[in-house]
Image (cartoon, helix red, strand yellow):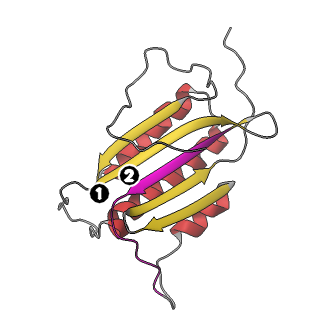
């Protein structure tokens, strides 16, 4: 799946919550690189997943993975330190997500979290840092990290979940 770039925050609450998640259901969010961004991402993604009746045991894993990826974009991609109120101009963190069919007949979500910051490889040696990507990998079906000169994109594919039953 090719996830298109996100030009603006197109997320808006839908009038009828808990609709069936049709394959192709899309979420696009653009946030500023600031420390409130992970919280905003969690809220928006939770609402979207809940609307599409994503199983709660999988919902938490998806929300965690995206929150961690957004935090990494803010801290590592843009170099914004914890407790900093600084926000670099033109420093977006973009999230694109789409419900796609799974090979087993279920459904999955493919998410891309991108920034335009600078990739910083993990520092070798003992550290209390560097656990985010391994944790994301532990709860997702696939994780692909794409650092480039133009920024970093983390593409995540969730484990398959059953199709949502139609509402009666």
Determine which residue is flagged by label 1.
35
Determine which residue is flagged by label 2.
38
In which quadrant of the rendered image does the N terminus lie? top right
Rendered residue at 37%/26% (across/down) = 12
Rendered residue at 50%/19% (across/down) = 17
Front residue (pair 118, 141)? 118
Answer above or below: position of 35 versus 162. below
Front residue (pair 61, 150)? 150
Answer above or below: position of 16 versus 70. above
Q: Residues within 10 Å of mark 1 (few under 14, many from 20)?
A: many
Give the farthest residue toward the bottom.
125
Q: Please say if the residues under marks 1 and 2 sit with CB atoms less than 8 Å apart.
A: yes
Query: Looking at the rendered structure, which numbered label has been put on residue 133?
Result: none
Which x, y percent locates residue 34? Answer: 26, 56
Instruction: Classify residue 128 as left or right of residue 160.
Output: left
Give the farthest residue toward the top.
168
Rendered residue at 42%/55% (across/down) = 114
Which x, y percent locates residue 145? Answer: 54, 64
Give the spatial CA distance, label 1 vs label 2.
Answer: 7 Å
* Res 15 quadrant in image: top left
Front residue (pair 158, 131)? 158
* Magenta region includes residue 119: yes
In which quadrant of the rendered image does the C terminus lie? top right
Rendered residue at 38%/52% (across/down) = 38
- What is the secondary structure assignment of the residue under circle 2? helix
Magenta residues (range): 108-123
Q: Residues within 10 Å of mark 2 (few under 14, many from 20)?
A: many
């Amino acid at each position: 799946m090719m996830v298109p770039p996100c030009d603006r925050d197109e997320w808006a609450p839908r009038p009828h919550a808990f609709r069936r998640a049709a394959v192709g259901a899309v979420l696009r969010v653009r946030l500023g690189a600031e420390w409130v961004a992970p919280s905003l991402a969690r809220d928006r993604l939770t609402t979207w997943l809940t609307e599409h009746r994503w199983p709660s045991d999988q919902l938490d894993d998806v929300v965690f993975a995206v929150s961690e990826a957004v935090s990494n974009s803010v801290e590592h991609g843009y170099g914004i330190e914890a407790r900093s109120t600084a926000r670099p101009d033109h420093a977006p963190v973009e999230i694109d997500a789409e419900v796609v069919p799974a090979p087993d007949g279920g459904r999955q979500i493919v998410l891309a979290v991108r920034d335009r910051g600078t990739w910083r490889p993990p520092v070798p040696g003992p550290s209390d840092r560097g656990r985010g990507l391994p944790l994301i990998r532990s709860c997702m079906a696939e994780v692909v990290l794409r650092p480039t000169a133009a920024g970093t994109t983390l593409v995540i594919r969730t484990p398959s979940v059953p199709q949502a039953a139609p509402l009666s």
